[in-house]
Amino acid sequence: MSDIDIYADIRPYNDNEVAPAIARLIADDEFIKAILHYRFPHLSGRFGWLLSPFIKFALTRRWSKIKTVQAVQRQVAGFMDRMIDKTTNKVTVSGLEHLTPGKAYLFISNHRDIAMDPALVNWCLHHNGFDTVRIAIGDNLLRKACATELMKLNKSFIVKRGAKGPREMLKNFSQLSGYIKHSLEQCQSIWIAQKEGRAKDGNDVTDPAILKMFYMEGKKRGEDFASFMQSLNIVPVCLSYEYDPCDVSKITELWQKRVAGNYQKAEFEDIDSIIKGIVGYKGRVHVAFSQPLQQAPSEPEQLAQAIDKQIWQQYRLFPVNYLAAGQQHNSIDEKVAEQWQQRLQGVPKDAISMMSDLYAAPLVKQLQLEKASH
C-alpha cells in the first residue's frame, strides 16, 4: 500500500483531484445557498431559486481553468489581498530572514482566529517567495461536505477529533503524526495551532499533548523525543491582531460558561465565527516568525514552555493592549480610548474584566517573561 493510500482520508487534494472537487462544489446546493446567504442576504430567501443558476454559471466560468493546487493557491492569494485591504490597516511580518525557501518547517502558532491565523501565515510566506503550508484543521469544522471540499482544495488536512474510544483515538493520532512527518519529508511545510481551539481568553499556551502526538511517529521509528523533535524544524509563530473581530462572541461564550456552567453552540456558530473573522475589522496585524528551535528539550512540557517563550517574546503590542491592562502609554489617544469603550459595550457589564484580560494578555505575558529573566 502506498503512502498516498494511508493518508487518503485526511490529506489535502492532489492536482488530479482539483477539477472534480470544484465540479462537486458547484453542484452542491448547500454551498450555493451559503454563497447566496452571505453575498445577497436580502435576496437569498425568496429569490434564491432564481439566483442559484446564475451563481452556478458564474462559478463554472470563473473556476473552469483551475486544474492544480497551485492555481487554487493563486485564487486564495487574490482573495486575501482584497480582504486585507478592506479589513486591516496594515499587515506586517518579521523573522522570515531566519527561514530558507525550499526547506520544510513545522509552524506552531498561537490561535486567535479559525481561518485567519493560517491564512495570514500563508499570505506572508507567499508574498515573500516561500511555498504555502499544509494546514491542520479539526473535523468539527467540517460537518458539511462543501466545507470539506473547500478545505482540502486549500491544502488543509484533517485532524480527527471525534474518536469513539481510546483505541480509535490512538489510531487517528498515529496517522496524523505519520502524515505530518511524511509532509515535511516531502518538503511541504505544516501549520498547526499550539492547542485545540482558539485562546478565547487571550491565554496563548502550548498543549504538551500536541507535542506528544508529533512524537508518536518518532517512537514508531525508534528515535528519542529530543532528536525526533529536532528533525521537525519547529518554528513558533506569533500572530498579533490589534482588534479581534470575534472578541464579543468569545467573551459572551466564556461569560455564559462562568454564569450557567455550560455553553451550547448554535448549529452554524463555527461557520459564523469563520466569516466574522474574515470580514471583520482587525486594525493592524503582525505575523512574527521565530528562529527554528535549535535544541529540543527531552520532555514535552519543557518543549511547550520553550515554544511559549518564543511566542510571547514576539507579541506586537498595540495601544489597546496597554489600555486594557490599565497601563499608561504615549500611544493611547482619544480615538483609541473611544473605540475601546465601544467594544466594551458589546459584552455584559460583569464580563468587562474578561474582555480586558483578552486584550491585556500579550502585555501581561511579556511582563511575566521580563520578571522571569531578572
Image (spheres, rainbow, N blue to C red):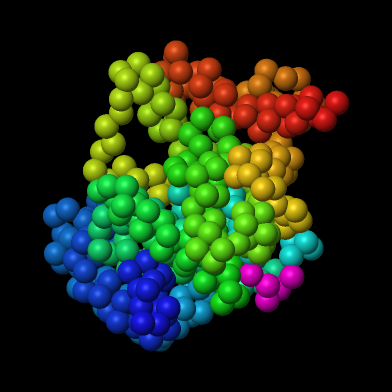
Residue 10: in sight, yes or no? yes
Can you say whether 308 is above or below 36 in the image?
Answer: above
The residue depicted at 49 percent of the width and 57 percent of the height is 216
Magenta segment: does it hold 101?
A: yes
**Toward which corner of the image does residue 50 lie, by quadrant?**
bottom left
Magenta segment: does it hold 82?
A: no
The residue depicted at 65 percent of the width and 51 percent of the height is 237
Q: Hey, which residue is sitting farthest front in the picture?
A: 222
Q: Nearer the viewer, residue 45 or 11?
A: 11
- Residue 133 appears left or right of 65: right
Locate residue 303, reporting x and y percent: 65, 45
Q: Hey, which residue is sitting farthest right in the picture?
A: 374
> The C terminus appears in which quarter of the rendering?
top right
Q: Magenta residues? A: 100-104
Q: Hey, which residue is sitting farthest top in the picture?
A: 350
Q: Main secondary structure of the magenta part?
A: loop
